[in-house]
Image: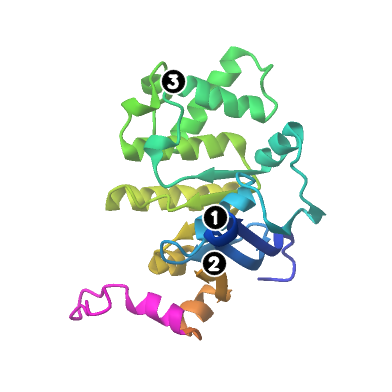
């Protein structure tokens, strides 16, 4: 990462243990990570590697067993609701399952208006709010007039993922954590969603963190790649270094597991 970039978020010795006594599970094991302004990062690992748990700690959705998180050079403090809300103005997420990402009792207007309120626009005139919501929907190729007074469950999966990106357009956070954002939608929608995320990143300069098992996606979009296995970071570096010149056997296995159309698939490790 170039020297002129500033670290927006850092984690030191980040650890998460679930359970007690003999039932304890070490989900994340003393992880150190640095995210730079405007950087695209991928945290890659199989199911159960701890990558989503790490993401939830970064987002402030679950407690930390051990370690510290630093945001903009200061130790993160989200102990009060007010401080937590302030932190969430700067860091947002897009989750894997669009069908469980929205409150089914809240109409789309309420979802978007809440974003405007979080950015301090609660007192704006109604016409200005509609203008902002129309602009955000237009960014993701949705028409606000076709969405107003509807509920999210009335949309398709791809439309709901685009609505989540419209939320990010309105919130303009410093960091976006995208946890498998394309795994539940078709290939055409997948490419569209990735293009929208990259365009948004370029427009507002936010840091994007992909949580994924797809090492091909990581290579395509990332500046930096972290490889997680059993709760630990086993390899990290630029996308070219990690994917083209892997040092760890686990990284090499992840790469070898990517199916290649022009080769006979080896299913012996499945």
1 vs 3, front mark:
1
Q: Residue 100: x, y in percent?
A: 41, 36
In what quadrant of the picture does the C terminus appear?
bottom left
Separation of residues labelled 1 and 3 (CA atoms) = 27 Å
Q: Which residues are magenta?
A: 249-270
Earlier residue among tags 1 and 3: 1
Is the C-beta separation of discs 1 and 2 under 8 Å? yes
Q: Which residue is mark 2?
A: 231
In what quadrant of the picture does the N terminus appear?
bottom right
The question of residue 265 being in magenta is answered with yes
Residue at image point 39% right, 43% down: 97
Separation of residues labelled 1 and 2 (CA atoms) = 9 Å
In the rendered image, is residue 205 in sight?
no
Count neighbours of disc 1 (C-alpha within 10 A) and say few if under 14, some if 14 to 19, many if 20 or more.
some
Earlier residue among tags 3 and 2: 3
- Element at badge 3? loop
- Element at badge 1? helix
Label tally: 3
Earlier residue among tags 1 and 2: 1
Q: Residue 74: x, y in percent?
A: 81, 53
Residue at image point 78% right, 45% down: 77
Q: Which residue is mark 1?
A: 53
Count neighbours of disc 2 (C-alpha within 10 A) and say few if under 14, some if 14 to 19, many if 20 or more.
many
The tag on residue 111 is: none
Tell me if residue 268 comes above or below residue 128 in the rendering. below
- Element at badge 2? loop
Q: Residue 62: x, y in percent?
A: 61, 46
Q: Which residue is mark 3?
A: 105
Tell me if residue 7 comes above or below residue 236 in the rendering. above
Residue at image point 56% right, 54% down: 19
Separation of residues labelled 3 and 2 (CA atoms) = 36 Å
């Amino acid at each position: 990462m170039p020297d002129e970039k500033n670290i927006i978020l850092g984690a030191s010795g980040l650890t998460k243990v679930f359970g007690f006594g003999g039932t304890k599970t070490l989900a994340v094991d003393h992880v150190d990570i640095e995210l730079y302004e405007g950087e695209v990062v991928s945290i890659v690992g199989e199911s159960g590697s701890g990558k989503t748990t790490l993401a939830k700690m970064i987002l402030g959705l679950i407690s930390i067993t051990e370690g510290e998180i630093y945001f903009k050079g200061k130790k993160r403090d989200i102990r009060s609701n007010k401080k937590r809300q302030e932190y969430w103005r700067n860091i947002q997420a897009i989750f894997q399952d669009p069908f469980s990402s929205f409150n089914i009792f809240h109409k789309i207007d309420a979802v978007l208006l809440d974003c405007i309120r979080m950015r301090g626009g609660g007192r704006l005139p109604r016409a200005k709010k509609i203008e902002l919501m129309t602009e955000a929907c237009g960014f993701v190729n949705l028409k606000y007039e076709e969405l107003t007074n509807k509920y999210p469950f009335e949309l398709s999966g791809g439309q709901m993922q685009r609505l989540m990106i419209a939320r990010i357009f309105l919130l303009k956070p410093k960091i976006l954590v995208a946890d498998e954002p394309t795994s539940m939608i078709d290939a055409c929608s997948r490419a569209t969603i990735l293009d929208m995320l990259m365009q948004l990143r370029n427009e507002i300069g936010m840091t994007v963190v992909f949580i994924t098992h797809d090492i091909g996606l990581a290579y395509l979009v990332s500046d930096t790649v972290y490889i997680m296995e059993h709760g630990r970071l086993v390899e990290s570096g630029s996308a070219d270094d990690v994917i083209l010149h892997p040092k760890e056997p686990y990284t090499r296995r992840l790469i070898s597991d990517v199916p290649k159309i022009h080769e006979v698939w080896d299913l012996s490790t499945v």
